[in-house]
Image (cartoon, rainbow, N blue to C red):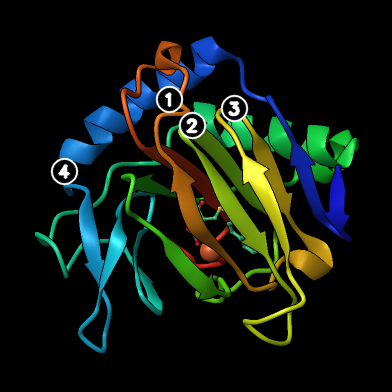
Amino acid sequence: ATLAPGAVHVPDWLPVAEQRALVDACRRWAVGPVPMRHTRLPRGGVMSVQTVCLGWHWRPYAYTRTADDVNGQRVAALPAWLVEWGRRAVADAYEDPSAAADYTPDTALINFYDAAARMGMHQDKDERSSAPVVSLSIGDACVFRFGNTETRTRPYTDVELCSGDLFVFGGPSRFAYHGVPRVRPGTADPATGLSGGRLNITLRVTGLAD
Ligand code: MD3
Ligand code: FE
């Protein structure tokens, strides 16, 4: 379903076997080389979501190669198979294989939400690229709030995101405000290997040179 120009939701896109494989991989990445952590905000706040990154390390307002706000280590590489999943995601969402051929994400942000975690309305503007963001959800469902490019308030649309759902945000939707006002605890399919909580993996193009 197209929510807005460039914003396409594909429910139940990722088969359960692949969801489980991604959960297993995320478990390993959560340990190191840079452990998953609650990101500290420059003004002293702490995000309720826990995050670990691949390819580039994200901290508010910057991407760096090493995680200087955690343990100084270089983050794990973004595996080629995830880049491939990203290309397939863009091709499927936009029903256009050529849109995907030149899509080469160089970073992934892996967010873990426990039952109480939320993400406030924000824009993703730390990338120096307007290439699409690919979002994969696994585990508990959530309410995803998709807003507009002008303000962090109404008008917005609330969408239920479930395990296996794909969302691609490109074109005019790339810089829209969005957030996660609540998780729905206990809605996960145990077959994914996640016993509780929600994982969201976003693939992005940073626009940075190695
Ligand atoms: C719309 N993550 O990591 S994914 C984030 O579920 C983030 O963890 C949420 O927002 C999550 O920055 C939402 C959906 C998403 C991701 C990136 C977007 C929506 C987007 C970029 C532009 C517009
Ligand atoms: Fe975001």
Q: Which residue is mark 3?
A: 164
Given this view, does label 2 or label 4 mark the residue nearer the observer?
Answer: 2
Query: Tag 3, which secondary structure?
Result: loop
Mark with earlier residue (1, 4): 1
Q: CA distance from mark 1 to mark 2?
A: 9 Å
Q: Which residue is mark 2?
A: 138
Q: Could you say where residue 185 lies in the image, as x and y percent from the top left?
A: 40, 37
Tell me which amino acid carries mark 4: Pro
| Quarter that holds the N terminus | top right
Query: Tag 2, which secondary structure?
Result: strand
Query: Tag 1, which secondary structure?
Result: helix
Q: Which residue is mark 4?
A: 33
Mark with earlier residue (2, 4): 4
CB within 8 Å, label 3 to label 2: yes
Compared with residue 29, is residue 62 higher up or lower down, i.e. above or below? below
Tell me which amino acid carries mark 3: Gly
Q: Could you say where residue 210 lies in the image, as x and y percent from the top left?
A: 42, 60
Q: Which residue is mark 1?
A: 22
Quadrant of res 123: bottom right
Mark with earlier residue (1, 2): 1
Residue sitting at 52 percent across and 32 percent down? 82
Residue sitting at 90 percent across and 38 percent down? 96
Q: CA distance from mark 4 to mark 3?
A: 27 Å
Query: Tag 4, which secondary structure?
Result: loop
Can residue 82 be seen from the camera position used here? yes
CB within 8 Å, label 3 to label 1: no
Q: Could you say where residue 104 lies in the image, as x and y percent from the top left?
A: 62, 46
Quadrant of res 13: top right
Given this view, does label 3 or label 1 mark the residue nearer the observer?
Answer: 3
CB within 8 Å, label 1 to label 2: yes
